Amino acid sequence: MKFYVTTPIYYVNDFPHIGHSYTTIAADVLARWNRLKGSEVFFLTGTDEHGAKIAEAAAHAEQTPKAFSDTISEGFKSAWKKLDISNDHFLRTTDPEHEKAVQFFLEKLFSSGNIYKSKYEGLYCVQCEKYLTAADLDEKGCCPDHKLKPIVHSEENYFFKLSAYREKLLEIISDQNNPRHLAIYPIERKNEIIGKLKTGLEDISISRAKLEWGIPLPFDPKQTVYVWVDALLNYITGLGYRENSETFRKFWPADVQLMAKDILWFHSVIWPAMLLAAKLPTPKKIFAHGFFTINGQKMSKTLGNVIRPDSLIERFGVDASRYLALSLFPFGSDGDISWNALTEKYNSDLANNLGNLVSRTLTMIEKFSAGRIPSTGTGFSEISDNIFNELTGAEKYIENLEFSLFINSVQSAIDKTNRYIEITAPWKMAKENNANLAQVLFNIATNLKIITIFVLPFMPRTCGKIWELLGETKPIEQTALKYFADKSANKNILCATNGAETKKGEILFLRLK
Ligand code: MSP
């Protein structure tokens, strides 16, 4: 099995913030999950560095666009490293190989009659990097998203025959039985796209005559490639499309392409049409998650409310930042976040619930079982089966990108284990020399071991640590892979290991004020 997952490539007009991190963490969880399940995974992310918006930002900073892009692209790379993002490649649209591959692709479309020259006049929003119609503007004549007046562009451009693909797009998006079916989620967004496609589709200009900061058109080098066409192609150039590499042949089409709803039209209409024109397969699934605001306001530098991954990590640590990002609201919906809400969730789910379970389990094993997993404990007891079934049943949530529902199931598994401790009260059993104590401790340790396996893609460091504290000596990934390779035959490797020497670690999640 293979699995190819992508995030958008992010503009380098600003350093990464929590919005970019959100999509990237989600893609990382999917990549890690599929690796555990034994798939061969390719996870691509990167930076989008051409176009008027970047040229403007660079001019403002009194730097060349390339020098400016270098700094910010590095900022993305280092943020993803700090967040333990396990991407297999990081693409920059200024990579010479990408530039060559874009030209190769456009040459193909030109020679197959998909591109023609024509004059165009329109209103262009540089911040959106797209043309707007008069109907798109607000009452002040500004772009509704950026509150800026669009500029009038009038030039001879090259056009892509997007309109020629309207019927085919409608077919592959609407018909689930079509062999090229392009699934768009959430369904409401898919319906919006279908509705819009039904009203018509116009050809789009794919070059700029007056913008130097871009890839020259191969068949008219005085013009540069429209930044969106350049950017969308990253999903295939990053695999080695031009040389028809083994990686490209193995991984294309993408299994899941992630983004927020702001750029769904580009991904679900323009991108597949470009692929159809080049006679390439279209992606299997596109998922547009929601947009979030901070304390009810749009995140913006002018408002000073931008949350950066560095400040999240500083407050909560890497793993908790990853967990919190995906836990606050459903992936497909819009949502609001605030430091308060993040802190509350951190304290309740991680410090109080998971952290407390780990520390009391290890303390009890130390006190009542001389710091070893009881050697007489065996098998899956009712409580372990119960949480095992809960988590196995929740796997579908990851597959469907319902991360917050998966996290709810994890919390329920932790709650149940904590409740089991209250009910069995091992400290009382110890006083009473109850012979069942060993099995009870074994069950609790088993529960924790199962939980770490399922939470691993979300919090790789923490789960690895708990694993070691439980006295496991083989790497957690190895056990997880073995289990997922044959779940029923290998279920027993999820049981705590008899006689393993446990450790009492430091507090995993300090409570925060
Ligand atoms: N460069 C284009 C994408 C080209 S992909 C071929 C672009 N870049 S961007 O830097 O503006 O990033 C947009 C993406 O960042 C969104 O689709 C989403 O993945 C993420 N987000 C940015 N702000 C966000 C929020 N406030 N909320 C949620 N996601 C956000 O568009």
Image (spheres, helix red, strand yellow):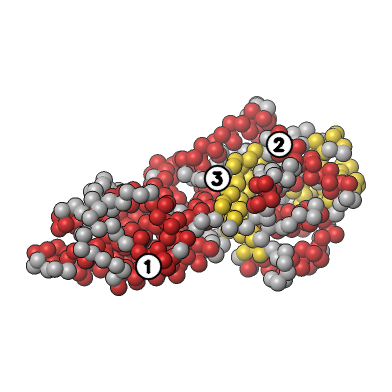
Location of residue 252 in the rendering, given as x and y in whole percent from the top left corner: 68, 53
Q: Which residue is mark 1?
A: 388
Mark earlier in primary sequence (3, 1): 3
Disc 2 is placed on an element classified as: helix
Mark earlier in primary sequence (2, 1): 2
Q: CA distance from mark 3 to mark 1?
A: 29 Å
Badge 1 amino acid: Phe
Work out whether residue 245 or residue 143 is closer to the camera in this orientation and state it: 245
In the picture, residue 376 is in which quadrant? bottom left
Q: Is residue 199 above or below residue 39?
A: below
Q: Is mark 2 within 8 Å of ligand 1?
A: no
Q: Which residue is mark 3?
A: 87
Please identify the quadrant where the N terminus is shown: bottom right
Location of residue 77 in the rendering, given as x and y in whole percent from the top left corner: 54, 38
Location of residue 364 in the rendering, given as x and y in whole percent from the top left corner: 19, 57
* Figure disc tally: 3
Location of residue 48 in the rendering, given as x and y in whole percent from the top left corner: 66, 41
Give the number of the disc on residue 371.
Answer: none
Query: Residue at coordinates 70% horizontally, 65% vertically from top-left?
Result: 181
Query: Residue 147, can we see it?
Result: no
Mark earlier in primary sequence (2, 3): 3
Q: Is residue 10 above or below residue 374?
A: above
